Image (spheres, rainbow, N blue to C red):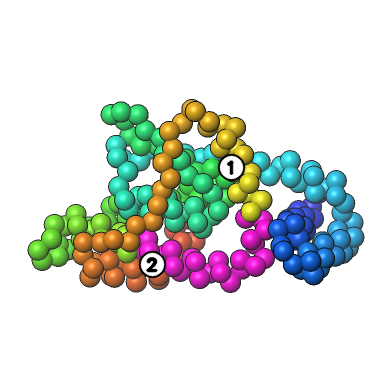
C-alpha cells in the first residue's frame, strides 16, 4: 500500500467516525458519501480500512526524570504534551526512586510526544533567571516555567482549533484505543497520576514574561536538532 493510499485511508476513517458520532443525519450522510467517493477514486475497500486499523495499535514510551516527586510545572508540561499529540500519560514511582513518565498513544504520536517532553523538560529545568526582589530564585524560575507552558499551550490550542473539525473524529478513535490499552495493560499493575495544568504563580511578572516566551516558541526546530527527526 502506498503512502498516498494510507493518507486517504486515514481521511476516510475520520469521515466514517464523524458520521457515527454526529447527531445530524445530514452531516452523517454527507460524511459517508465523501468516504465512499474517496475509496472508489483510489481503488480502496473496507478491507483496507480493517488492515489499517490493525496497524494503528497503541504503545508506550517512557523516561526517567531527575526528581523523586513530580513538580507542578512538570505535571503541567506533561498535560501540554498530551494535548498537542493526543496521548495519555502515566506517572510511576517507587519509594526512594526517581519518577518515570510514560506516554501512551498511537504511533508516531507517542514517540514524538516523548521527544517533545524531553526537549522542553531539559530546556525549562536548566533555565536560570535573575532573582526577583523579595522572592527566592526558585519561585521566580517556577513562575516563569508555568507561564511559558501556559503561553505555549494557548498557542497550540489556537493552532489545533483551526484544524479540529477535520481531526476530531480521528482523535476520538485514538482515545478509545488508548483507554482500551490502559485497561488491558495497566489494570492493577501501575499506579498512575493524571497530570494537570497549573497556572498559579507566586511571581506574576515572571509568569507573564514566561507566557510571552511560550507564545513565541517554535517546537519543531528544537525537536529536529535534538532528536534527528
In front: 53, or 108? 53
Task: Describe residue 139's horizontal placement relative to residue 64 as left or right.
Answer: left
Check disc 1 and report its element: helix, strand or loop.
Answer: helix
On the image, numbered disc 2 is attached to which residue? Answer: 151
Q: Residues within 10 Å of mark 2 (few under 14, many from 20)?
A: many
In front: 149, or 29? 29
Q: Residue at x 49, y 61 (%)?
A: 220
Residue 39 appears in the figure: yes
Task: Describe residue 136's horizontal placement relative to residue 206 as left or right.
Answer: left
Is 163 inside the magenta-drawn segment? yes
Q: Which mark is residue 107?
A: none
Q: Residue at x 9, y 63 (%)?
A: 134
Residue 227 appears in the figure: no
Q: Is residue 26 above or below residue 114?
A: below
Q: Which mark is residue 179?
A: 1
Q: Residue at x 33, y 34 (%)?
A: 98
Q: Position of residue 28 (x, y in %)?
A: 78, 64
Q: Residue at x 60, y 32 (%)?
A: 184
Among the two numbered marks 1 and 2 on one chain, the one whose residue lies closer to the N terminus: 2
Q: Is residue 43 above or below residue 94?
A: below
Task: Describe residue 65's horizontal placement relative to residue 161 as left or right.
Answer: left
Check disc 2 and report its element: helix, strand or loop.
Answer: helix
In this view, the residue farthest toward the left is: 134
In front: 1, or 100? 100
Q: Position of residue 210 (x, y in %)?
A: 30, 66
Task: Describe residue 76's horizontal placement relative to residue 114 as left or right.
Answer: left
The magenta stretch spans which residues?
Answer: 148-171
Q: Is residue 16 above or below residue 56?
A: below
Q: Position of residue 143 (x, y in %)?
A: 25, 61
Amino acid at each position: 500500500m502506498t503512502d498516498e493510499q494510507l493518507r486517504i485511508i486515514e481521511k476516510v476513517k475520520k469521515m466514517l467516525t464523524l458520521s457515527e458520532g454526529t447527531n445530524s443525519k445530514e452531516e452523517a450522510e454527507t460524511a459517508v458519501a465523501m468516504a465512499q467517493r474517496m475509496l472508489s477514486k483510489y481503488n480502496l475497500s473496507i478491507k483496507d480500512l480493517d488492515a489499517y486499523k490493525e496497524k494503528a495499535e497503541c504503545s508506550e514510551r517512557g523516561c526517567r526524570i531527575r526528581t523523586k516527586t513530580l513538580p507542578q510545572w512538570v505535571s503541567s508540561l506533561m498535560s501540554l504534551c498530551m494535548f498537542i499529540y493526543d496521548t495519555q500519560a502515566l506517572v510511576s514511582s517507587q519509594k526512594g526512586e526517581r519518577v518515570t513518565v510514560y506516554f501512551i498513544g498511537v504511533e508516531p504520536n507517542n514517540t514524538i510526544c516523548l521527544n517533545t517532553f524531553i526537549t522542553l523538560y531539559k530546556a525549562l529545568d536548566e533555565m536560570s533567571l535573575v532573582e526577583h526582589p523579595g522572592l527566592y530564585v526558585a519561585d521566580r524560575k517556577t513562575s516563569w516555567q508555568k507561564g511559558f507552558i501556559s503561553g505555549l499551550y494557548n498557542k497550540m490550542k489556537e493552532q489545533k482549533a483551526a484544524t479540529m473539525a477535520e481531526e476530531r473524529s480521528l482523535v476520538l478513535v485514538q482515545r478509545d484505543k488508548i483507554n482500551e490499552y490502559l485497561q488491558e495493560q495497566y489494570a492493577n499493575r501501575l499506579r498512575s497520576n493524571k497530570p494537570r495544568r497549573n497556572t498559579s504563580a507566586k511571581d506574576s511578572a515572571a509568569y507573564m514574561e514566561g507566557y510571552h516566551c511560550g507564545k513565541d516558541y517554535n517546537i519543531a526546530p528544537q525537536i529536529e536538532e535534538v532528536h534527528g527527526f
